[in-house]
Image (cartoon, grey):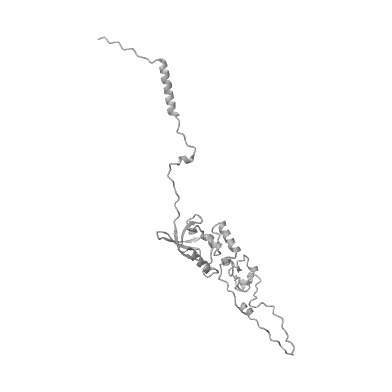
Amino acid sequence: MPESPRAPKRHLPHWMKITLGVFGVLFVLGAVFGKAPAKSGNAADATTNLPATTKPAPPTYTVTAVTDGKLVSLIDPAGAAKTVQAAGIETPTAGHCYATETGNWATQFLVGKQVTVQLANGEATALVFITLADGTDFSAKALRTGHAKYAANVADDALQAAETSARNENAGLWGAPCHGMITGPTPLTSTKQTTSSAKTTTPKPTTSTTAPPTTTPPSTKPGPDRTYYADCDAVRAAGKAPLFIWQPGYRPGLDRDHNGVACE
């Protein structure tokens, strides 16, 4: 059979080709360089939907005992016990001047109280600041009332100022009999001189016609209460070093740091 004639091909008009080409180019450009979502200039907007984070409260401890005015025994709510040292203070140890007063005060002030602790140097040590429930800092209170001296194991201007106030007022250990010296026993005040000075005797008049007795010049040698050491070498040679403020022979010239202990 003879083939049927094929239908002639239909061609798009030239203007339609151009229009479709332009739209195609625009579509590709839009896909490649499409506008990104606008970013907020406020950093807070980016975190608006983030969950709020709260810093956990420090654990609360109960004070069970105080040793030497600065070693504090604690127990947490779970019953675990630990011992910490109050930062920034130096206290007299047992047998030294003002140790009893400091120990009694610290025990009454802390034992049974609820406290929180904060590491003093940011390290996992037992040196801490102890804060009572009302916000009172234990170290600052001990210094201000004269129950401790400032210790340079932490640098804290507020603690140094508290010690200065107590020292200026002769409070606690800064007064008599310690006068700031807490590294030795409590000075003993002699009662012999006080007793002898209290007793006054009226000399009886003498009517003797005999010649007055001759008097011998006073001795220039130091008596038992007039001990004198020229220097610390003499003190050490006599076996008396260190020489405390209440002991015979003590004088400020031998006490370089004026802490009541000469020839340390």
Q: Which residue shows up at 50% across the image and 67% down it? A: 104
Q: Residue furthest bottom?
A: 209
Count of all numbered marks drawn on residues in the image: 0
Of residues 211 and 225, the one nearer the viewer is 211
Q: Please determine whether, in this image, residue 198 is positioned above or below residue 33.
A: below
* Image quarter of the C terminus: bottom right
Residue 53: image location, x then y, percent = 44, 47
Q: Please determine whether, in this image, residue 136 is positioned above or below residue 192.
A: above
Q: Residue furthest top?
A: 2
Q: Which residue shows up at 48% across the image and 40% down it? A: 43
Residue 165: image location, x then y, percent = 59, 61
Q: Which residue shows up at 49% across the image and 61% down it? A: 85
Q: Please determine whether, in this image, residue 168 is positioned above or below residue 54.
A: below
Residue 238: image location, x then y, percent = 61, 74
Of residues 194 and 241, the one nearer the viewer is 194
Q: Which residue shows up at 63% across the image and 79% down it? A: 198
Residue 115: image location, x then y, percent = 47, 59
Would you identify the image quadrant in which residue 159 lies?
Answer: bottom right
* Image quarter of the N terminus: top left
